[in-house]
Image (cartoon, rainbow, N blue to C red):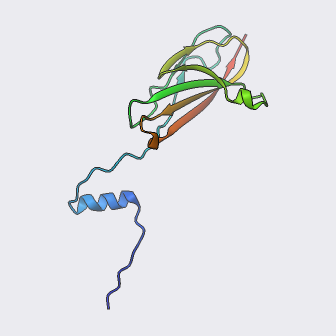
């Protein structure tokens, strides 16, 4: 007597098996955006422009949006943790008017809402 056995096979394995068997089909992309950014001055001075570059980010469903915010890491209030808008776009320039540590957050959002968003945070220390 033969009995069917049902096993859970990961999607990647199932897709690879389908290609081997000659069944070619397009699978939807499922990767979340990956946020990465560079800073031209990790320790800038007050009122000096800093360039933030997110062109190394990955986003598979264009057009992708890039939003930048900063907040003070030592402030206990929820309002400040929401941050202050710095700008939008893959490359921005920004200057702080106060000294101290600042957490910069980049959020990359894909055009397709099912693909979500990715974020990256770096601490910048602004000197006098």
Residue 103 in sight here: no
Q: Residue 74: x and y, percent? A: 77, 28
| Corner quadrant of residue 104 | top right
Give the side of residue 74 with respect to residue 63, left or right.
right
Q: Residue at x 39, y 75 (%)?
A: 6
> Which residue of the protein is positioned furthest toward the bottom in this rendering?
1
Foreground of the two, 6 or 20:
6
Q: Which quarter shows the C terminus?
A: top right
Q: How many tags in the picture?
A: 0
Q: Residue at x 51, y 38 (%)?
A: 117
| Corner quadrant of residue 72 | top right
Q: Residue 100: x and y, percent? A: 74, 19
Q: Which quarter shows the N terminus?
A: bottom left
Give the side of residue 4 with respect to residue 128, left or right.
left
Foreground of the two, 59 or 85:
85
Q: Residue at x 65, y 18 (%)?
A: 43
> Which residue of the protein is positioned furthest toward the top in this rendering?
47
Q: Residue 3: x and y, percent? A: 35, 85
Q: Residue at x 46, y 31 (%)?
A: 57
Give the side of residue 84 with respect to residue 32, left or right.
right
Q: Residue 118: x and y, percent? A: 52, 37
Q: Is residue 103 above or below residue 127?
A: below
Q: Is residue 7 above or below residue 2?
A: above
> Which residue of the protein is positioned furthest toward the left in this rendering?
22
> Which residue of the protein is positioned furthest toward the right in this rendering?
76
Residue 49 in sight here: yes
Foreground of the two, 72 or 115:
115
| Corner quadrant of residue 75 | top right
């Amino acid at each position: 007597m033969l009995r069917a056995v049902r096993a859970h096979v990961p999607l990647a394995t199932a897709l690879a098996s389908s290609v081997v068997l000659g069944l070619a089909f397009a699978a939807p992309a499922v990767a979340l955006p990956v946020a990465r950014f560079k800073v031209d001055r990790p320790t800038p001075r007050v009122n000096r422009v800093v360039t933030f570059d997110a062109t190394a980010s990955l986003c598979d469903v264009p057009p992708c949006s890039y939003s930048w915010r900063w907040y003070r890491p030592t402030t206990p209030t929820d309002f400040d943790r929401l941050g202050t808008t710095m700008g939008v776009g893959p490359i921005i320039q920004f200057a702080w008017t106060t000294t101290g540590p600042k957490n910069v957050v980049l959020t990359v959002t894909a055009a397709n809402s099912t693909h979500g968003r990715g974020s990256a945070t770096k601490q910048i220390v602004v000197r006098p």
